[in-house]
């Protein structure tokens, strides 16, 4: 139908995996010197992505989106605190 949008949950996990791979490469390049900054940046990205997943899950009735969003938010908070 025209005007409808389908939520693909696997895309969220794919993007998260790519971001984690890039962050891992940055950790290898910069070694332990800027590890705290990278953890904070990655934590904030997880918080934003998790919030978007939760709102998208609520909007489209996607329970997997809500659950993955909550997991991302919890991991993001843990990384910012660490």
Image (cartoon, grey):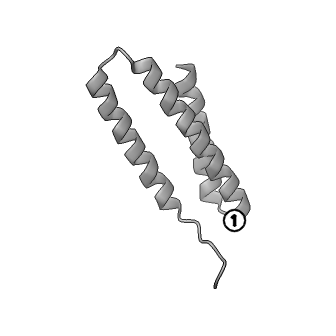
Place of residue 48 in the rendered image (x, y in percent of width and height, measured from the top left): 60, 41
Q: Nearer the viewer, residue 72 or 15?
A: 15
Place of residue 14 in the rendered image (x, y in percent of width and height, measured from the top left): 42, 54
Q: Nearer the viewer, residue 19 or 65?
A: 19
Q: Residue at x 67, y 50 (%)?
A: 54
Visible residue check, residue 71:
no
Q: Residue furthest right?
A: 59
Visible residue check, residue 60:
yes
Q: Residue at x 35, y 39 (%)?
A: 22
Quadrant of the image occupied by residue 80: top right
57 relative to 7, above or below: above
Q: Circle 1: is it few (<14), some (14-19), or many (20+) Cα within 10 Å?
A: few
Q: Quadrant of the N terminus?
A: bottom right
Q: Residue at x 45, y 47 (%)?
A: 16
Place of residue 61 in the rendered image (x, y in percent of width and height, measured from the top left): 70, 64
Q: Residue at x 40, y 40 (%)?
A: 20
Q: Residue furthest top?
A: 33
Q: Is residue 66 left or right of residue 16?
A: right
Mark 1 element type: helix
Q: Is residue 22 left or right of residue 65?
A: left
Q: Residue furthest bottom?
A: 1
Q: Residue furthest front?
A: 3
Residue ID for mark 1:
60
47 relative to 41, above or below: below
30 relative to 22, above or below: above
All told, the count of numbered labels is 1
Place of residue 74 in the rendered image (x, y in percent of width and height, measured from the top left): 60, 35
């Amino acid at each position: 139908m025209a005007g409808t949008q389908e939520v693909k949950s696997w895309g969220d996990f794919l993007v998260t995996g790519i971001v984690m791979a890039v962050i891992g490469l940055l950790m290898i390049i910069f070694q332990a010197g800027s590890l705290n900054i990278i953890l904070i940046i990655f934590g904030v990205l997880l918080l934003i992505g998790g919030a978007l997943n939760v709102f998208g899950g609520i909007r489209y009735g996607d329970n997997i989106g809500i659950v993955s969003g909550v997991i991302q938010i919890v991991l993001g908070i843990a990384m910012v605190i660490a």
